[in-house]
Amino acid sequence: MGKYLAMIRMRFLMMLAYRTDYYTGILIYSINIGAYYFLWNAIYGEKSSIEGLSSMQMTTYVAVAWMARAFYFNNIDREIANEIKDGKVAIEMIRPYNYLGMKTMQGLGEGIFRFFFFSIPGMLLVAFIFPIELPHEPATWGIFAISLLFSFIINTQINLLTGITTFFLYNNAGLIRAKRVIIDLFSGLLLPISFYPIWAQEVMKYLPFQGISYVPSMIFTNGYSSGEIGMALLQQLIWVIILIIPIQLLWIVAKKQLIVQGG
Amino acid sequence: MFYVSMFFQYVSQYMKTRLQYRADFFMEILSDLLNQVVNLVFILVVFGHTQFLSGWSREEIIFIYGFFLIPFALFSAFFNIWDFNDRYIVKGEMDRILTRPIHSLFQVILERIELEALFGVVTGLIIIFYSGVKLDLELAWYDPILFIIFAIGGALAYAAIFVAIASIGFWSDAKTSIMPMMYNIGNYGRYPVDIYNKVIRFVLTWVLPFAFVGVYPASYFLRKEEWYAYAFATPVIGVAFFMISVFIWNQGVKRYRGAGN
């Protein structure tokens, strides 16, 4: 366990050293939130609510969805791909830790850093500019935190899966890009899932993506009833468990057929 | 003439290298396509809940998006200079560029072309055609000519912003993370400017003319007469901003001192 904690710490400190890069990140996210804020305002027009969300809740949804993304988002799929391509993965695999576990911890270190230096100041900045409503109940904050942790795990698991495919595809830059676009759309970052036509919602029920952004954002905006919250959290937990299976299977196969292309 | 032949030599060289890795080449086109599909899905889903967006109908918004894709594709194919600072200034590559007998900006652009982005023109045309038919738009004989002029004007406006920002690298070698920021601001131009407040509208028109890439020129083809003045200003703005940015670039090159050895 100690070595994994050290991994988190190292990545955190590494990020801290380059923290100036993140100030522009906050601005970029704020610009995106701004674009969607105006767009949603125009969409709402005279309407007081769409699909149970008021215009104020929608702004909050957009803001929290982007700032949560700063926490759960990481590039470990690309890091894995690069380590496979330049052969470093061979060294990593003889080291006395679980390679995938170690990557997850690095992602977590990055996430924790961005949570404190990106999400929180970003949220404050956005709350200052746009009319958003923060939850009043402390319980909501607690549930949101749990849900956010799940969303980090699900997103990281999908990243691990994408990263492992490099073992078979050798070059998966396109796949990584495609995955990112798909997650943005199906996770509820761009559009709350409840806005999609019913048939699309039915399909998305069977996909892990809405656990990444839609669930935590809905909790934060008080868009769920208390029964729905429980179901949503349970669904996230189930996906966390289910996704372990393909990762482990692929990993076993991948280790056997590893070809180091250089190094 | 020399510039034209240089251009085609670089393009043929580029095709050779890209087609070495065909799978990746098609993946890149595919992921661009996916991105465009996502944006369209967004528009479609949104219009499942409203009839009009500040008075613009669904087909009109789709038309604007389709139009936007064309100058954006031209821009992405030929002005892929978002990492100019890292690639040319920090690494000292600019020294090599300056020893060549063609204009430095032209040389940088040639080295960084990404022709697969041009596929966006195809998607853009399909989208425009689809929504144009739905809207029953009438075409005058000179409209295709205007279309090309507006598309090039829009691409120049876009390019001008990025060339000007790349030129900052000549003055300060600080990491310019302004580039990704600009890409995000550029998204504002995909929607009608009347949904934004006055300040943003002013910025999108006169400071960072992203509105001239999408809404303004598209509004001419949508026969929105209140925007005609802006629509016809597109090529003027494009050329003017581009000339300013080349001037800034030239000034920057004069100041360039190289990075160490």
Image: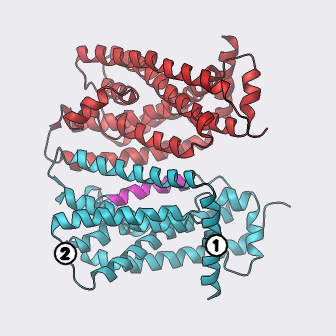
Chain colours: A red, B cyan
Give the structural element (helix, strand or loop) at label 1. Answer: helix
Magenta part of the chain:
B178-190
Q: Is residue B162 above or below residue A146?
A: below
Q: Residue visible at 60% across and 64% down?
A: B166
Residue holding disc 1: B10
Q: Are marks 1 and 2 on the same chain?
A: yes
Helix, strand or loop at label 2? It is helix
Q: Mark 1 or mark 2: name the one nearer the start of the chain.
A: 1
Chain name for mark 1: B
Q: Is residue A228 visible?
A: yes
Q: Is residue A138 visible?
A: no
Residue A195 in the image, given as x and y percentages of width and height: 23, 37
Q: A47 and B219: which one is in front?
A: B219
What residue type is disc 1 on?
Answer: Tyr
Query: Among all residues in the image, which is located at the extreme top?
Result: A1
Residue toward you, A110 or A172: A172
Within the magenta stretch, is there residue B212? no
- Give amino acid for label 2: Glu
**Relative side of A110 to A208, left or right:** right
Front residue of A134/A171: it is A171
Up the image or down, B184 lies above or below A218; here it is below
Q: Is residue A40 left or right of residue A234?
A: left
Residue at mark 2: B225
* Mark 2, other Cα within 10 Å: few <14 / some 14–19 / many ≥20: few
Q: Residue at horizontal 30%, vertical 39%?
A: A191
Q: Residue at x 50, y 44 (%)?
A: A177
Query: How much space separates mark 1 and mark 2, taking CA atoms?
Result: 42 Å
